[in-house]
Image (cartoon, rainbow, N blue to C red):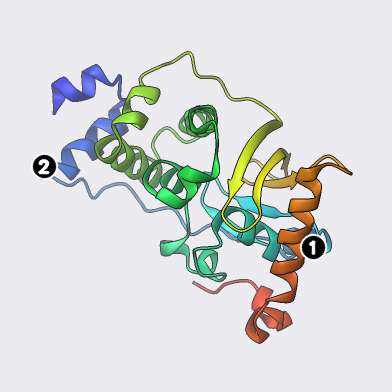
Amino acid sequence: MEALAGALNLKEAERRHLHELAGGRRRGARRRPAPERVSPATRQLIATVGDVPAVVLGRYIDVLAWNPPGHALYAGHLAPDAPDTPRQRPNMARLLFLDAHTRDLYADWTAKARAVVANLRVATGHHPDDPLLAALLGELTVKSPEFATMWADYRVKAGGDAVYEMRHPLVGTMHVTQQTLRISDDQVVVAATTEPGSPSHAAMTLLIHNALTSRTPASQDPRHDAPVRT
């Protein structure tokens, strides 16, 4: 395990979790962080831009909330209420590296994967001793050789807005600009847009229309967006 950790340039917290995954001694002194919450103002924001796919990501790039188009664009194969349970929230890194549906969404999967790894590297700088973050990194390192290779490459840098070719199973290929709005130290809103008048815009419009017209009564209930109690 130490040889693997050294080859991957893992930090101390990541080394500890790698040993735990391999059956080593668990360390119980670190306190588990409280579940992340989305403020009412942020929920109102993503509801207001209801015709634009939007997701709220937390400090570990967990999906804390999404509007119906955001759910349809990024993870229509998951339950719409998946972000509502803190311990079962979708995580963008897990989805990208370990979920075949999400992997197939990106024509240039490597570019998107490197951006996600860069975001996680920034997170480790802000939360170097966070046990949940260490657990995520350890899990991805063990389960995905591609993640392990990218994590060991310190040339990876976080970027800003990016354009990706997305191959959606319902509406086909789209060129999507993913724009990031930081709303707090640990949370961002990611909005997806397309160039007006383009074939991508037509495909996105179709996807959004389908998402908004196929909502279940439960998702239409305004109580659905109430803060989650944990």
Residue 216: assigned label? none
Residue type of the residue flagged with mark 1: Gly
Q: Quadrant of residue 19?
A: top left
Judging depth in this view, the residue of 189 and 161 nearest the camera is 161
Q: Nearer the viewer, residue 16 or 140?
A: 140
- Count of numbered labels shown in the rendering: 2
Check residue 24 in the rendering and tell me which mark sits there, or answer none.
2
Q: Mark 1 points at which residue?
A: 50
194 vs 200, nearest the viewer:
200
Label 2 secondary element: loop
Instruction: Indicate left or right for 183 with 172 as reference.
Output: right
Q: Between tags 2 and 1, which lies in front?
A: 1
Q: Is residue 104 visible?
A: yes
- At 35% from the left edge and 39% from the top edge, which residue is drawn? 134
In the rendered image, residue 45, in percent from the top left (x then y), is placed at 79, 59
Quadrant assignment, res 16: top left
Q: Which amino acid does label 2 sit on?
A: Gly
Category of crowding for the residue at label 2, using alpha-carbon neighbours closer than 10 angstroms: few (below 14), some (14–19), many (at least 20): few
